[in-house]
Image: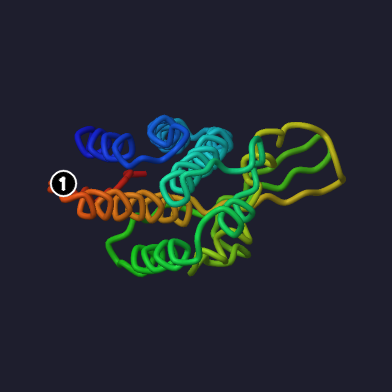
Amino acid sequence: MKQGIKAIAKGIKSSGSKGQPDLAYNSSYLLLQTGLQCLKDSYQNNDRYNEVIAVVNMSLAIELALTALVMLDTGKQTYKHKHDLLQIYSKCISPQIQKELNKKYVEIHNDPKNSKLPKRKFIRRTFECALQSDDFDIIDSESVSQFLDIHNNAFAKWRFIYEPGEDKIEFNFDFRAALTFYEAVALTMVDIIKGFYEKHNLPFDNVVKLKYGIEL
């Protein structure tokens, strides 16, 4: 796995993209691993509030991976300090790459061997918080647009989930869909890098199929 990540980072550095997409991508990968470990710890220690930490890390991981994809696709950076996944996707990524990303997402989502991570509903009331662990009332994210509708601004929302606010606020997060989206972004980057290598007649023989499994 580490060799695969290094191969992608090396390809990013050679792609001619402006900014530092390799730094964004490698940072996203570390955040993803931290989030998955927190999710695993929440099950092992029966501490469901670790899932909130998992959501925060995985949400930021997705944002940084998407930022790296934008740099590879357009050579430009995204809107600075905007934790708006929908805006990054719709306004910063070219229509062709959007199409490819959604195609990969659907393929991974429909793969019966895909990870079986849970969906979560977190209900926050004034001075009281409660995690509901079942999958009920959370729509399945069957496409990128559905995923973004549910998880847009997830990082901004969940990182301040402890603060008192309205009488009742519900937060939804689908870990399986989040992992699916991350992998689709990573594989789309691999395709862009491979295309760059082929265009310049450079050898590219390390296309990595990324899989992030976790046993709960």
Q: What is the quadrant of residue 155 in the picture?
A: top right
Residue 142 location, x and y as percent?
48, 69
Q: Nearer the viewer, residue 16 or 212?
A: 16
Residue placed under numbered mark 1 in the picture: 202
Q: Quadrant of the C terminus?
A: top left
The residue sitting at 23% across, 33% down in the picture is 2
Q: Nearer the viewer, residue 209 or 77?
A: 77
Visible residue check, residue 70: yes
Residue 153 location, x and y as percent?
66, 47
The residue sitting at 31% across, 67% down in the picture is 111
User: What residue type is disc 1 on?
Assistant: Leu
Visible residue check, residue 43: no
The residue sitting at 27% across, 36% down in the picture is 5
Please, is residue 43 above or below residue 203 in the view? above
Pick out the residue farthest to the front. 200
Q: What is the quadrant of residue 148 in the picture?
A: bottom right
Please, is residue 50 above or below residue 186 in the view? above
Residue 93 location, x and y as percent?
52, 56
